[in-house]
Image (cartoon, helix red, strand yellow):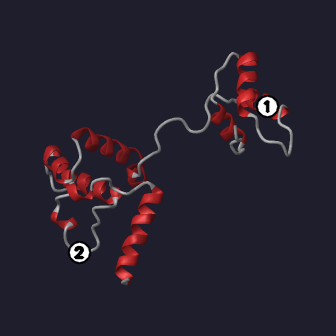
Amino acid sequence: MSTQNNRKRAKIAALREEGTLYPAPEQVCDPKFQEGDFFDPRDAVQVKYEMLRRVSVEKASVTDASNEYGVSRPTYYQAKADFEQAGIAGLVSKKRGPRGPHKIQSEILAFLRTRLVPGEPIRARELARLIQQEFGLDVHPRTIERAIGGKKTSR
């Protein structure tokens, strides 16, 4: 296998790992992305930046730039707002949804830890039942396992 193919695969893996792999590189029609190796249609940050630059510097219309880079106009405006707020770093996609177990706050976590026995498996279903009785809160057993960093137990 050639060194160039290995580099391409490594770059794709890195982009995927960082969450910056562009989902539709085939929709990028800008000629710069079709020739050479510098502009990469798989690099979401580079694609978004060039789209913003086309409108800002080259005075392309938002509609034309959105079409040329394979995104919707709302996506363009979101990228513009993200860039204005945080610069290039703002163009890196952010993970959506809650950051961590939001139902299990410190009081519930302390409650759970008092019921864990070192060396024994976590009995998440039983703990979920106890949380319901004590706090009136429905928590999925897997949420409990993630919160205490344990592994699933077999049924």
Residue situated in front as seen by the camera: 88 or 97:
97
Q: Which residue is mark 2?
A: 36
Element carrying mark 1: helix
Q: Mark 1 belongs to which amino acid?
A: Ala
Which quadrant is the N terminus positioned in? bottom left
Residue situated in front as seen by the camera: 63 or 132:
132
Image quadrant where residue 4 sits: bottom left
Numbered badge on residue 25: none
x, y percent for residue 143: 64, 34
Element carrying mark 2: loop
On the picture, is 154 further left or further right than 118?
A: left
On the picture, is 117 further left or further right than 126?
A: right
Q: Mark 2 belongs to which amino acid?
A: Gly
Mark in front: 2 vs 1: 1
Q: Residues within 10 Å of mark 1 (few under 14, many from 20)?
A: few
Residue situated in front as seen by the camera: 117 or 25:
117
Asked if the residue under mark 1 is in contact with the one under mark 2, i.e. CB atoms within 8 Å, the reply is no
Q: Is residue 98 above or below residue 129?
A: below
Give the mark count.
2
Numbered badge on residue 110: 1
Residue situated in front as seen by the camera: 84 or 97:
97
Residue in the picture at 69% in, 37% down:
155
